[in-house]
Image (cartoon, rainbow, N blue to C red):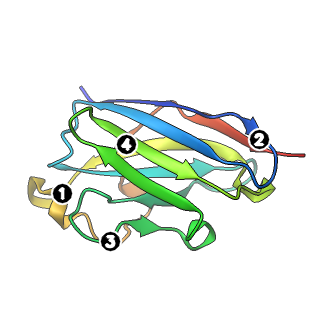
Amino acid sequence: AVQLVESGGDSVQPGGSLRLSCAVSGAPFSSHCLAWLREAPGKEREGVAGFVNNGDTPYYADPVKGRFRVSQDPLKNILYLDMSDLTPDDTAVYYCAAARAPYGDSGYCRGWPGPSFFTYLGQGTQVTVSS
């Protein structure tokens, strides 16, 4: 069974930084598309960053480009999201997400498919940015 467990959410002031971690089990990095999604109060769930394991350029949503960085440690089965220069608009529940890659090859994790593509979600971790 696929399990995704996020950690690292916190309350920070604008301009602050956080690192989110996702412990992944049952979804090998070589055969699954992995990403971070977020859901803010009153808004639809949206993609943040992902596909760091496709051997090419990761995906970043426009609002986070240049501020967020997705990375992975496949030996430890951990997906990371480093966030900097946080603003109140980044306040949301952040979810780790996974889906089996096309043809079972993470090299095909390309072209952002939207949040509904992801079959598995973690329980989420709250990030609050406020002064």
Disc 4 crowd, CA 10 A, few/some/many (<14, 14-19, 20+) = many
What residue did someone put label 3 on? 57
What residue did someone put label 2 on? 12
Of tags 2 and 1, the one toward the viewer is 2
Q: CA distance from mark 4 to mark 2?
A: 21 Å
Q: Earlier in the sequence, mark 4 or mark 2?
A: 2
Toward the viewer: 42 or 84?
Answer: 84
What residue did someone put label 1 on? 106
Mark 2: amino acid:
Val
Cβ–Cβ under 8 Å for marks 2 and 1: no
**Residue 24: x percent and y percent?**
31, 33
**Residue 19: x percent and y percent?**
55, 42
Cβ–Cβ under 8 Å for marks 4 and 1: no
Q: Secondary structure at mark 4?
A: strand
Image point (41%, 67%), residue name: 59
Q: Secondary structure at mark 2?
A: strand
Q: Earlier in the sequence, mark 4 or mark 1?
A: 4
Q: Earlier in the sequence, mark 3 or mark 1?
A: 3
**Residue 69: x percent and y percent?**
48, 58
Toward the viewer: 129 or 104?
Answer: 129
Toward the viewer: 90 or 121?
Answer: 90
What residue did someone put label 4 on? 79
Q: Secondary structure at mark 1?
A: helix
